[in-house]
Amino acid sequence: MKNFSDKLSELGFSRIVAGVWRWGKLPQSQWQILIQQAVELGITTFDHADIYGDYTCEEQFGQVLKANAALKAKCRVITKCGIKLKSAKRPGHRIKHYDTSAAHVLKSAETSLRLLGVEVIDLLLLHRPDPLMNPEEVAEAFYRLENQGKVKSFGVSNFTPAQLEMLQSFLDIQLVTNQIELSLFRYESIFNGTVDVLMKYRMQPMAWSPLGGGRYFTSEETAKSLAITLQQLSEKYHCTESQLLLAWLLTHPSGIYPVVGTTRPERLEEAMGALALTLERQDWFALLKAVAGKDVP
Ligand SMILES: NC(=O)c1ccc[n+]([C@@H]2O[C@H](COP(=O)([O-])OP(=O)(O)OC[C@H]3O[C@@H](n4cnc5c(N)ncnc54)[C@H](OP(=O)(O)O)[C@@H]3O)[C@@H](O)[C@H]2O)c1
């Protein structure tokens, strides 16, 4: 099925997005290799948050871009704000908490711009639903950032459908995504209305931990039925198990954008290979059955 008006592709986003959350522990030289390799493969969109790497990832990424204008021109950046970590870098934070006040959203976006070394953030997400969120303040911050040309588009992350619709009702700007945890291992949002509401508003979901954070590959407890199904299907489709896990997401008609978290160049290439797969409908359900342990009702 062809995806309806794809706002993320209109923003120039690659269908596979590289998430940098786990890159925080890597040396600067490895950032250079990963960004270069990703862009060469066609993974030109990078998912950040102000807090990744204990507030260090944006700067490490920015250092690579600042040294390479040609690379920078090809990159699209997503970043998030709204979580305040207890960190030596933020001595004022007495406790981990959320802050979606206009003042914090503006300040966070401006800091991200500076550290990332870009003139515009392609997509700014509110990282988590904040119980104290005042939607009028968020609207004010978003309008200012848009009017100043600092942020191109806006979205949310980990929001319920009701939270998303509530915030949207205060905005003239249309939100473009809800970045949610979504994989064959965490598929509830496909069934509980979260993804349906995104489709209703013609927003593409972004899937974080699309491989379930890699636990499947290392856990002893992996369901035998899943291991068998993945093995059979990887033989059938001549692909790897992680490509099948990504293809399972890419098959969904909402147009899911997986945000892969690998720290290895070769696995970025592997992820791109998933785009070439077309899963048969019954195989999609076979994978679901393998994790659910039963047929659909
Ligand atoms: N919005 C949010 O609240 C939120 C929350 C969490 C994450 N995120 C975003 O989502 C991104 C991805 O999350 P994630 O890192 O959990 O995604 P993921 O792609 O599901 O998991 C990546 C992990 O799986 C491992 N892995 C991948 N393929 C493997 C294989 N074949 N065998 C063994 N291990 C394998 C990787 O190890 P290697 O590095 O060794 O390949 C890495 O540790 C993050 O970087 C971040 O940008 C957003």
Image (cartoon, rainbow, N blue to C red):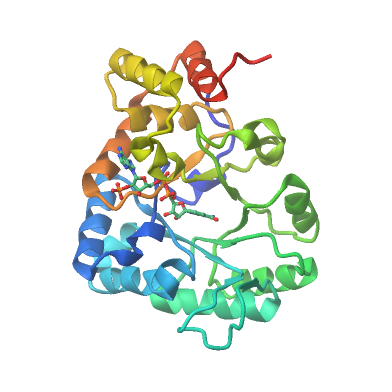
Looking at the rendering, which quadrant does residue 222 occupy?
Answer: top left
Residue positioned 66% across, 81% down in the render: 103
Q: Is residue 137 left or right of residue 113?
A: right
Q: Position of residue 5 (x, y in %)?
A: 58, 38
Q: Position of residue 17 (x, y in %)?
A: 41, 48
Q: Pick whichever, 57 or 4, lies toward us.
A: 57
Q: Is residue 31 left or right of residue 256?
A: left
Residue positioned 27% across, 42% down in the render: 267
Determine if residue 73 is in view: yes
Q: Quadrant of the C terminus?
A: top right
Q: Pick whichever, 253 or 295, lies toward us.
A: 295
Q: Position of residue 158 (x, y in %)?
A: 63, 52
Q: Position of residue 10 (x, y in %)?
A: 50, 47
Asked if 248 appears above or below 154 in the picture, the reply is above
Looking at the rendering, which quadrant does residue 191 occupy?
Answer: top right
Marker count (numbered): 0
Outermost bottom residue? 92
Residue positioned 50% across, 11% down in the render: 282
Q: Pick whichever, 85 or 276, lies toward us.
A: 85
Asked if 85 appears above or below 122 in the picture, the reply is below
Q: Is residue 122 left or right of residue 20?
A: right
Looking at the rendering, which quadrant does residue 101 occupy?
Answer: bottom right
Q: Is residue 45 left or right of residue 153?
A: left
Determine if residue 117 is in view: no
Q: Pick whichever, 93 or 32, lies toward us.
A: 93
Residue positioned 62% across, 43% down in the render: 203
